[in-house]
Structure formats: C-alpha cells, structure tokens
Image: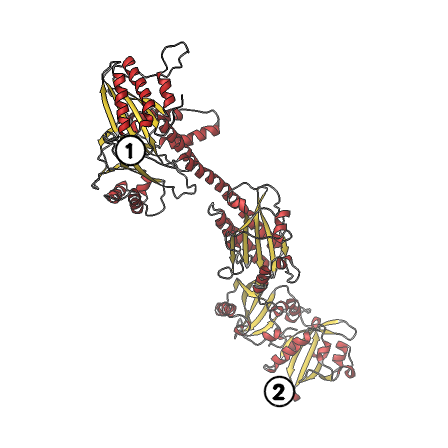
Amino acid sequence: MKTSRDALPGGAGQACDMAKAATAELDGQGRVVSWTLAAERLLGYRAAEILDHPAAELLAVPGDTARAAAVARWCRSGDGWGGSVAARHRDGRELQLAVQVTPVVNGIAEGAGRERWSVLALEEWRLPGGGVNQLMLEPFLAHAPVGMAVLGTDLRYVWVNDVLERLIPLERRLGRTVHEVLPKLEAEAFEERMQKVLRTGSPVMDYEFRSPTYADPNQERAYSASFFVLEDPQSRRVGIWYMVIDVTERWRAQERLALLNAASARIGSTLGITRTAQELADVAVPPLADFVAVDLLDSVIRGEEPVPGPVGGAPVLRRCGQQSVNEGCPEAALAIGEAVPRDPSSPIARALLEGESQVEPDLDLEHSAWVNETAERAAVVRAFGFRSVMVAPIKARGITLGAATFARSSRLGPFTADDVRLAEELVARAAVCVDNARRYTRERTAARVMQRNLLPHELTGGSALEVASWYFPADTPSGVGGDWFDVIPLSGARVALVVGDVVGHGIDAAATMGRLRTAVRTLANLDLAPDELLARLDDLVIGLLETGSADAAAEAENASVAATFMGATCLYVVYDPVSRKCTMARAGHLPPAVVRPDGAVDFPELPAGPPLGLGAMPFESVELELAEGSLITLYTDGLLEACDQDIGVGLSRLRGALAAPGASLKETGGKVVKALLTGPPSDDAALLLARTRALGAHHVASWELAADPAVVAGARTLVDRKLSEWDMDGLAFTTELIVSELVTNAIRHATGPLTLRLIRQTAPDVLICEVCDASSTSPRLRHARTTDEGGRGLFIVAQLTRRWGTRYTPTGKIIWAEQGAGAQPRIA
C-alpha cells in the first residue's frame, strides 16, 4: 500500500463512473460497518460475511496490514488519502483497486470511538484514458527496482515505493521530514539538493552517498540519488520526487580498483623487505580488513634463496608487518621481528604447505582452528570481535615467501569471494616486490661483504706512524661505493699511505676499487717513488680500458667498468721515519692536510695531476720534512661534500676540526666527523689519520765502508757490537752471515762508496739490514749447482730472512733484508 495526500491524482475521482464504484464505511478500528451491493459485486463478499470484520482481511498482500495501520495513523492528521491497493476477491483473484479514503463529517471531532471513514474503490482498468493514468502507474512504480519517494514542498514524505520502504519502514517516513528520517549528514545533503531543485526547477543528478542499512547498521551500502521537481498543470512547483539506485557493487568495484591502484603506488616504494611487508598491511587496512599481519620466512629476510614449492613446518616465520584499525595494533600478539609459532594443522601452516588461501567467512568461535590453536589467539578473537578470517600465501616466481593474514569484525562483514580475489591480488603484487627486495638484499649483502673484504681490516704504521681510519658508506640504495684507503709497510721501516676514490656506487665501483687497491699494493712492493707509482698505475688503467669484447653484454659491462675507472683518483704518500721525509703525489685527488705539532694546519701545494686513465700529463712528487708528532690527514671528497657542496667550505671546516694540538687520533677523527658529516653522506666518505714518529740514533746505526774485501770482517764486528748494545745477541750469527753476503756482493758487483745500515724497528719487532752502493745493477737470486764454488749468497740471505729486496735511489740502489727478532733461521 502506498500513500498520497492528493485524492485520486489528475482529477481521476471526478472522471470515474460513480455508479460502478464500490463504497464501504470503516470505524476507528478499521472494521467494516457499512457494505454496498457495488462492493459485493466488486469483491464477491456479501454484507453478512464482511461486516464487523477488519478491512485488512481484504488485502491481497499480508504485509499491507502493517502499512494500513501506518496509513490510518497518518490519515488522522490529514484530510484523506488516495492511492492504489491490491485486494483479494472472494474467489482468490487479485484486484488492483484505485481507492480514496475520506473522513465522515464530524467523525474525528466525536472521538476515536466514533470515527467513521468512507471508502470509495474502483478497478483501475475502468479509469478514464484506457486505464493508463497515474493510479495505474502507481503499482508499477511501487514495485520498480529502484527506490522512489515523493515529498511536499515542506520536504515531508508523502509516498515511497517498496525499495525505499525496505530500507526504512513506512511508519518511520510518512509525514516526517528528511531530518527526522535520514542520518544527519545524509539529511543535510538531501535537503540542500532538494531546496536547490525547488528553487531552480532543474534536476540534480547522480549524487552518490553511503549509508548503513536499517537491518544492519554495521553494514554500509552505496547509493546514487537524483532529484526532480513536481509541477501541477499550472506549472506550479508542488513537491519533489527523487529516485535512489543501489550502486554498491559499482562502488565496491571502484574501491577495489582504487585499492589496487594505491597498492601499485605504495607497495614496493623501497627495496626493504620489512618495509614492503608493512606497506602491504598499511594498504589493506581499513579498506579490506580490520587487522592484517604479514609473516615472512626468516631466510627471505636474510636475502637467501628459498627452496621452490610448498613450505613445511621447519622454516622459521617472522612477523614483518602488521596494521589494525585500532591504534597501537593491540590485536597483535607478536612484535615486529619475532618468530611466529604455528601448529602443523593451523591455517597458516596449511596455506604454506598447500599454496592456497585458507578462508573462514563465518568464524566458528567454538571449533575453528583459528580460535583453538592458542589460548592467546582465542582471547584476541573474542576480545576484538573477529568474525571472518583469511590467510593467503605470499608467492612469487614459483617460491613461497610467507603468508598474510586478514581478519574482519562485523564492521565489514564476512569475506566474500570477491574479497578473497582482491586480497590474493594484493598479496601477489606485494610478493613480487618482496622477492625483488630479497634479491636486492642478497646482492647488497654480497657487495658489502666484498667491499669489507677489499678494505683493510687492521691498519698498522709500525714504528713510523700511528694510524686511525674512518669509513662511511653513502646513503644510497646499494650502500656500497668505491672510496678506499690503505697503509702499506715498505722496506727500511718506511710506510706508504694511500687513499682513492672511484666514481659511482654499487658492485662495479667496489670491484674497481678492489682492483686498484691490489694494483697499488703490488706496485708499492717494487719500492717505486710516488710519482712513478702513479704513472705505472695510470698505464695499468689505460690497458684495462683498452680491453675490448665482441659480446654486446660484455661490451656494456666494460663500458660501465670504464666509466668507474675514468673517474678514479688517488693520493700516494711515503713517509720515512729515519729521515722524517714525506714524499707525496696525487692523481686528481684532493691534497692532504698536514698538522704540525703546534696545531698549525697546512694543505701542501701538491700538483693535482690528471685522474687515472687519461695518460695526459706526468705526475709530480713533492717532498716535505716533518717534525715528529706531525699529523698527516688523507680523505675523500665525500667527507667534505657532506656538509656543503662547496669544497672550499668543507676544507675550511676540516682545517678548524684538525687544529687541536695534543688530542689523540680518536678524538681528532671524532671532531672531524662531527664537523663535516652533518647528515647521511650522499657519497662515500673516508678519513685516514697518521701521526709521525722518528727513529733516532738508538734505533739506527750507519757506517761508511770502503770497496775492499778486507772490510767484510770489520763490518761483521761492527754489527755484532751494535746488536749487543741493542740486546739482540740472538740475531748476531744470522746477521753476520747476511752482512757478509750483502757487503761481499756489493764489493764484487757494484761500485763504491758503500754504506751499511742497521734499523731496529718495533711494532713489529724487526731488524733491518741495508747495504747501499752506487750501482744500478739489479741483484739476481741464482740456484747454484753442487759443483759451483759461489753463487749462493742471495740464496742464503733469502733463507735467513723473512723478506729481502732492492730499491733504487737517485745515486744507486739499496739491498735490504728483514729479520724477525724472535724468528728462527730456515737453514741449519
């Protein structure tokens, strides 16, 4: 039954054939108190069968009884009612009647017990115009698949159809304003649009909104409403009608698409595994679930390659991400990083083993494995009202990475098949990002391990230098770069300091750095001067750059390596603690800083030289004499550029941080780092500090010898006496043999003058024997035959020492040999 304040719209009452209309009269309780022959002919009931019976018994639809009562209450406040009613004929036929109800004059004034209502009814097909008018259309509109309602100019409901009546019952609508019927925000939006329609006469189309259902306030549905003006024949605006369409499925489809788009933008924003897992949880809450937990295999977190196929109970799962609609995620029994306990029969274990989602749309709080697995989980499920749960395996490229658990309370209702497909799509997208992050983690870990192995683990300057170093990788995704440094022991107690910078980041830069560091160490063992060493290193780089390949992939790789080589710079410094001379040369690198014992800081004027691989200009060395306790500072440009892109600003800050006389290396280095690294460095930053020491007369002994075989015996005596002074008598025998062979060879194969020098070096405890001559002839180790009378001198020296060699000077060469203070000779 539908309602209208107008009696038979469109003047239908006046056009009806009143002789054929049925009439009856009802009392205040809705009982039939008067019945005419026309009514008997229309419905088939005789007066004796219907008098004193409720008129509601004549209705064809049982639910219309409650509607009739609502109409009766509404009619008492008005002046009548007209509309369409479905009635039941005595023979069972259903008749659609046009009905008009009118109060009997003075009926209302005489009290509720004396109310009388006159009812006029006529079959709708008998109406004028062939039966097609507003009254005939009313039942079709009443049962239309879209919601429709009519309101007066006061915005009170006059008529609604079945669809809207199912949303909010009729008795809660008729005669009420939109503010009395609809939620506040919805009512305000409706009133604003209806007032606009009344004011302008123009319709308002497709206003979309969401509203809870009357049956279940926890469930929301989406609707689209359009508003139109009602005008009478004189074009006067007499009301509003609107049409409401349920667009929940379209809205859900749009939300799913929006969620997938958001997932594409938000999941995988970094190459962090746990960050990616957390992004999955953040995206899914609250649109898809009230609580989400993402658990990954421990091996995946470490970047290892998981075993393809299903996952049994042995591998460890760890919580990597979780999110909740409740602040603080109180539903989570685990913290990020904790191991996830799981029973072999649990849904998570089944999902990992079977590789398929496990869903329980309506959670059984008594028998479900979700509840019975642990008491803690059961308490959480009950406390937070979880009603639907799902777990989806996280799989990518044929391997299982973990599982994602989704839980819902009554807020979103049970998981549907569409929800499961949406969750699986989200998990699949996240799985690819997690696997990419896993692979990146593995490569990054390998690159970092390689870089750590290529850089020196321990630095020692021996008796010549006290050294300390700092290294800060760039704040880049790879975290691996090409900055490097080294401290290399040389002959004669000398020490080489080297720092270099390879352009770029990643494994290519680290590999290039390793090759350069190895090359420098190899060349340093030749005891080359700094400028000559850089020239040899430059030639080596040029040779590597000229190496070609016919393979396209190899050519691309060579191009990448060439780019890193071409941007490589290097600074090489050699310090001699005996002479306190420091010789240095650089290939495109920043100059070192030298701090005198009084705290004065100087940047030596050292020719820059070209970067390695250009081969354009020669390299030049500069020699300085340093006081004992001077501080040599080597660094890379990443240290200076971290505070400001202007190198000059960085050098000024470095000067200020180094000017601290008396501070330890650790204190000085900390001050430099604090002054220059004001934030994460965009490039690798390396710092190497070396404080000079000097070896005086109590560590060095030197004698000038004539080029005469007779001096050999005297040389042995001098050595024996000095070793006794140094309390090194245990090395007297071997040292006498070494001195005899080296001096004899110099007399036989070189030219004078000759110089014999002993150097006692501590940390490590080493004795160095040197013989200097004026010849540039290189000695050669021979394997003499058993019948040869000589040729075994250098062989004996090699057996008695831990290392020996030759270095050249501007006036000749030096043959040197080192013995460990506690070492035993290797021959009897």
Q: Residue at x 61, y 72 (%)?
A: 169
Q: Secondary structure at mark 2?
A: loop
Q: Nearer the viewer, residue 488 or 676?
A: 488
User: Which residue is nearer to you in this view: 403 or 152?
Assistant: 403
The amino acid sitting under disc 1 is Ala
Report the residue at 66% width, 60% height from top. 367
Left or right of 723 in this view: 246: right
Determine which of the numbered discs, if any, sits on residue 464 in the image. Answer: 1
The foreground one among 282 and 454 is 454
Element on which disc 1 rests:
loop
**Residue 94, x across and y down, in percent:** 74, 71
Residue 762, placed above or below residue 204: above
Give the mark count.
Answer: 2
Of callouts 1 and 2, the N-terminal one: 2
Q: Using a 10 Å C-alpha cutoff, classify the residue at mark 2 as few (fewer than 14 neighbours), some (14 to 19) or many (20 or more).
A: some
Quadrant of the snapshot with the N terminus: bottom right
Q: Are marks 1 and 2 in contact (CB under 8 Å)?
A: no
Q: Nearer the viewer, residue 432 or 421?
A: 432
Label 1 – label 2 distance at C-alpha: 120 Å
Please give left or right for residue 585 compared with residue 101 in the image: left
Q: Which residue position holds label 2?
A: 108
